[in-house]
Image (cartoon, rainbow, N blue to C red):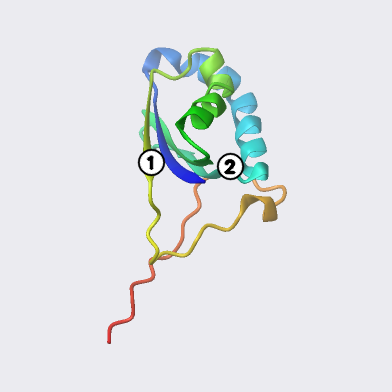
Amino acid sequence: MTVFAVEYVYDAESAEVRDANRPAHRAWLASLAEQGTLLASGPYTDGAGALLLLEAADEAELNATLKEDPFAAVRGIAGIRTSEWNPSSECSPPTPRSSMTGRVPGPTIHPFQPKEST
């Protein structure tokens, strides 16, 4: 599976429609987290967008998944940028969301673990 960094870009005009559809969007994120597809997600603090880290077999599967987002259905996303992402082997792997039952999806932060010097 490939890890993808997905950046959503929001515009001010869509704030109302996003607010109205946020519960459905979060339920969609929670279902992806339970499946192990969503590794981390969260909005930028300035409200201009969000970052999602997702696993998918390929870009076609990723795009099919993103089309299911309730924000996409109501045109709450002004733009999307996707990139394949290689997590650093020096960092701890994310804890699978499936082991975090009942937790609302959000950013997962892992401490930086530098290589031991010899």
Residue type of the residue flagged with mark 2:
Thr
Q: Earlier in the sequence, mark 1 or mark 2?
A: 2
Residue 93: x and y in percent read 50, 61
Mark 1 highlights which residue? 84
Residue 105: x and y in percent read 59, 43
Residue type of the residue flagged with mark 1:
Glu
Which residue extends farthest bottom? 118
Query: In the picture provided, is 110 more to the left or to the right than 22?
Result: left
Mark 2 highlights which residue? 37
Other residues around mark 1 within 10 Å, as few (<14) / some (14–19) / many (≥20):
some
Work out whether 22 lies above or below 92.
Answer: above
Q: Total of numbered circles in the picture?
A: 2
Residue at 48 percent across and 40 percent down: it is: 42
Residue at 28 percent across and 83 percent down: it is: 117
Quarter of the image where one finds residue 49: top left
Residue at 39 percent across and 70 percent down: it is: 113
Residue 62: x and y in percent read 50, 31
Residue 21: x and y in percent read 59, 20
